[in-house]
């Protein structure tokens, strides 16, 4: 970074930083796509595990075909912690958060909230 201090002129400094950042990105390409896929896979595995923990099917109608349709419902009076936000955490934390939840399919969940 000594080279950076060499440029007292703001325009020269800006040009140097632009070249430096371009070279850095060439040497260290972002691997965001790979990391995103990994995180998505891990969250999906944790959701599958959480669904199995709560019985593996909708507690109202018994639906169990698609994992993406099953949701976690917080009964009234239960402390609500957003399930989506904790799916990236350790299993013990997820288990504590969902132990009071009820597993429902999307249709049953909507019916339940429409009635109340």
Image (tube, rainbow, N blue to C red):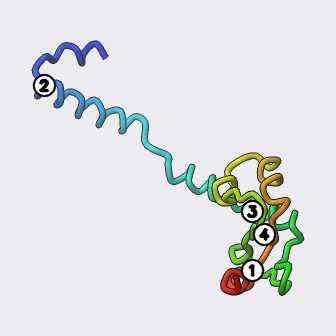
Q: Disc 3 to disc 4, how far (Cα)?
A: 19 Å
Q: In the figure, 23 relative to 51: above or below? A: above
Q: CA distance from mark 2 to mark 3?
A: 51 Å
Question: Residue 66, position in %: x, y?
Answer: 74, 78
Q: Position of residue 3 (x, y in %)?
A: 24, 16
**Dot 4: few (<14), some (14–19), or many (≥20) neighbours within 10 Å?**
few
Which circle's residue, 1 or 4, is located before the other in the chain? Answer: 4
- Which of the two labelled residues, at mark 3 and mark 4, occupies the earlier sequence position? 3
Residue 75 is tagged as 4
Q: Residue shown at 36%/38% (left/top)? A: 26
Q: Is residue 9 above or below residue 36?
A: above
Q: Residues within 10 Å of mark 3 (few under 14, many from 20)?
A: many
Q: Is residue 103 left or right of residue 88?
A: right
Tag 2 secondary structure: helix
- Residue under pointer 3: 47
Q: Is 25 placed above or below 61 here?
A: above
User: For residue 10, what is the image quadrant?
Assistant: top left
């Amino acid at each position: 970074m000594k080279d950076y201090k060499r440029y007292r002129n703001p325009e020269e400094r800006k040009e140097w930083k632009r070249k430096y950042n371009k070279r850095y990105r060439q040497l260290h390409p972002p691997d965001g796509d790979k990391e995103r896929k990994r995180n998505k896979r891990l969250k999906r595995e944790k959701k599958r595990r959480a669904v199995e923990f709560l019985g593996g099917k909708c507690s109202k109608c018994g639906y169990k075909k698609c994992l993406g349709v099953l949701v976690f419902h917080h009964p009234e009076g239960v402390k609500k912690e957003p399930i989506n936000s904790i799916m990236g955490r350790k299993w013990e934390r997820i288990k504590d958060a969902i132990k009071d939840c009820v597993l429902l399919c999307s249709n049953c969940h909507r019916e339940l909230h429409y009635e109340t």
